[in-house]
Amino acid sequence: MDLQLKDKIVVVTGAAGIKGSIGETIVQSLANEGAIPVIVCRNNRGYGYEKELQEKGIDALFVKTDVTETKQIEAAVKIIVAKYGKIDVLINNVGVNDGTGLDASIDDFVWSLKLNLISYFAMTKYCLPYIIKSKGNILNIGSKVALTGQGGTSGYAASKGGVLALTREWAVDLIKEGIRVNALIIAESWTPAYDNWIKTLENGEEKLKAIVNKIPLENRMTTPHEIADSCLFTISNKSSHTTGQYILIDGGYVNLDRSLLTE
């Protein structure tokens, strides 16, 4: 299926994670579809990803940005527009489940909101004039923690809950402009970071088995490629009448009947 993303300028935040992470996989998938991925992230890995794509003859850009600093976000958007003259799609992908719970300081809680929620608002605010001009769309990457709770992560849960609320608020605001805004909600996805976390646990294999057994469809985690495929479809014109939606890519983890779970 041709998703008609060729030469679209797609900005992806938090996309310079470990190779095989969700953001990096989205970037690679965009490049494979002929889109022009723009990585906005604070990690220097982004320089390597930019070079890797360019060496394959693929236009790509990395703009090193600390998204907790709104001035840096504003500057990043200016750099993008100076090079390409437009922005077609924004994928707000930043997310760090930082363990900022009720025992954390107020400053830690505020920092979590800056990273996981306020960055979404700031990126959208500064990209929006160009997205309106191009008749593009916005996709927010959310988390099941916004719907289920998890415990011990008040900052992340509040942020991701806010992301879902903003998704529908923006969908309403931008109806008049013909701009679609959706959220993709992820539950358990097998990423390099998840693998690294499991390896730090004394009973890692048992913990992993317990998690996987709670995923109804095929008792397995969602892959980053499955998430990327859903992202690309949602931002494409093949989803031209989809807006204000929470799209769960989770093997039924959040919404299916608990009776489906294995022992």
Image (spheres, rainbow, N blue to C red):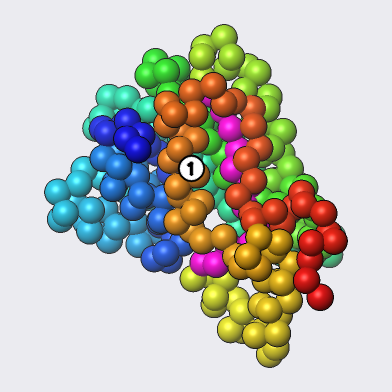
Residue situated in front as seen by the camera: 168 or 130: 168
Q: Tell me the quarter of the picture where residue 141 sits.
A: top right
Assess whether residue 178 is covered by the magenta stretch: no
Percent across and percent down for residue 214 are 74, 67
Residue situated in front as seen by the camera: 132 or 82: 132
Image quadrant holding the N terminus, namely: top left
Percent across and percent down for residue 263 are 81, 75
> As displayed, is residue 132 above or below residue 227?
above
Magenta residue span? 180-191
Q: Determine the residue located farthest toward the bottom in the rendered image.
A: 202
Looking at the image, residue 198 sits to the left or right of residue 34; the answer is right
Assess whether residue 181 is covered by the magenta stretch: yes
Looking at the image, residue 212 sits to the left or right of residue 136; the answer is right
Residue in the image at 49% along x and 35% along y: 234
Q: Is residue 108 visible?
A: no
Label 1: few (<14), some (14–19) or many (≥20) C-alpha neighbours in 10 Å: many
Q: Is residue 251 visible?
A: yes
Q: Which residue is mark 1?
A: 231
Looking at the image, residue 43 sits to the left or right of residue 58; the answer is right
- How many marks the image carries: the answer is 1
Percent across and percent down for residue 84 are 26, 30
Give the residue type that dot 1 points to. Answer: Cys
Percent across and percent down for residue 85 are 27, 24
Residue in the image at 73% along x and 76% along y: 210
Residue situated in front as seen by the camera: 71 or 256: 256
> As displayed, is residue 150 above or below residue 139?
below
Residue in the image at 20% along x and 46% along y: 58
> As displayed, is residue 112 above or below residue 179?
below
